[in-house]
Structures are given as structure tokens and as C-alpha cells.
Amino acid sequence: MFKTAVRAARPAAQAARGSVKPSGSSLRAFSTSLRVQSGPPPPQLYGTGGKAGAVPTDIEQATGLERLQLLGELEGIKIFDDSPLDASRIGTKADPILVPSFDTERLVGCSGFPADSHDVAWFNLEKDKIGRCVECGSVYALDFQGEEVHGDHHH
Ligand SMILES: [Zn+2]
């Protein structure tokens, strides 16, 4: 269940990545505007906030996905696998860039070669299929390292 929640949260996390981290004061203004907006509110995770007279730590003021990631790190769980992929070359159909994964699909972000030569393009990579970056055409393949799930398969 946790895994499902994390997977659902990924695109939002990636959208949020790169946004400026709010300071303590703008964070309060942000939470006020959330209360008046229409529609269902996004999932919220709030810390205790900074102590008076002290600079708040990340764990005290981080919210939402950032907080989820921090809490995960405290427990030794990496919520978002953001380890860089092989960016030393452009992947080709014959020799795709391998993306290690314990899941049968994984979201991949490509920034081209050399790295950051185009805006990060995200696409979903599935086991036994190749994925191609729409920006630079680099080809990726899932290097599945999890356990195969055989349904009612009899030998
Ligand atoms: Zn690319």
C-alpha cells in the first residue's frame, strides 16, 4: 500500500522538484491560501514548525512530499530513487541505457547527452519494452531486478 502511494506521488514530486523551498513566513501564507481554495485539498503532511527564536530545520518545516522523503530518509528508506542514470552516452536500440528497477515499471527522466543538454523529459519505462526520449531520442531499457511474479502457471 505504501509502495502504491509512493508511486502515485511520484509525478507530483517531480513537478515540485526544482521549485524554490518556501521560507517559514511564506509557508504560513501558503497554508492559508490552501484553506480557501475550492476542490479537494491535496494530501497534507505538516511538521511541528520551527521553535520561537530558532531557525527551523528541514524536518520541522518540510511539508507534503518533501516531508515524506525526509521521514523516509530517517528510517533509511529512499522514497524517491533519484540516483543518476548512465549519462555518458546516448542510448540506442541495440545498446539502450539500462535502468535498474525492482518494479516492472519505472519513471525515467532524460536530460540528454551531455547531461542537462535538454529540459528533463519524463516517460514511463516498462519491463521488456524500450523507452525513447522525445527530446533527444535516447533509448532506455528496464533492467528488472525484482522477483518475477508467476500467476497460476503450472510446470
Ligand atoms: Zn533525452
Image (cartoon, grey):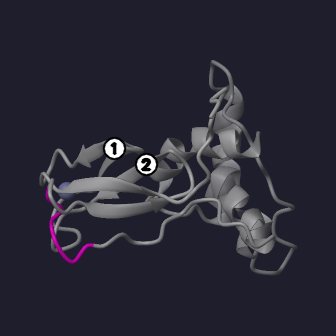
Q: Quadrant of residue 23?
A: bottom right
Q: Which residues are magenta?
A: 87-92
Amino acid beneath label 2: Leu
Q: Which residue is mark 2?
A: 107
Q: Are marks 2 and 1 in contact (CB under 8 Å)?
A: yes
> Which percent across, then down, holds residue 93?
15, 53
Magenta stretch: includes residue 91: yes
Q: CA distance from mark 2 to mark 1?
A: 6 Å
The residue carrying mark 2 has its beta carbon less than 8 Å from ligand 1: no
Q: Which residue is mark 1?
A: 123
Amino acid beneath label 1: Phe
The residue carrying mark 1 has its beta carbon less than 8 Å from ligand 1: no
> Which percent across, then down, holds residue 144?
48, 55
Q: Quadrant of residue 5?
A: top right
In the image: residue 21, left or right of residue 76: left
**Extreme residue toward the bottom, this view:** 54
Residue at the image point whose x is 33% and y is 63% from the top: 98
Q: Secondary structure at mark 2?
A: strand
In the image: residue 3, left or right of residue 136: right
> Which percent across, then down, holds residue 27?
66, 55
**Extreme residue toward the top, this view:** 39
> Which percent across, then down, holds residue 119?
23, 57
Q: Residues within 10 Å of mark 2 (few under 14, many from 20)?
A: some
Question: Which quarter of the rendered picture does the N terminus lie within?
Answer: top right
Residue 71 vs 141, above or below: the answer is below
Q: Quadrant of residue 19?
A: bottom left
Give the dominant element type of the magenta stretch: helix, strand or loop. loop
Figure quadrant, ligand 1: bottom left
Residue at the image point whose x is 59% and y is 43% from the top: 7
Front residue (pair 48, 129): 129
Magenta stretch: includes residue 138: no
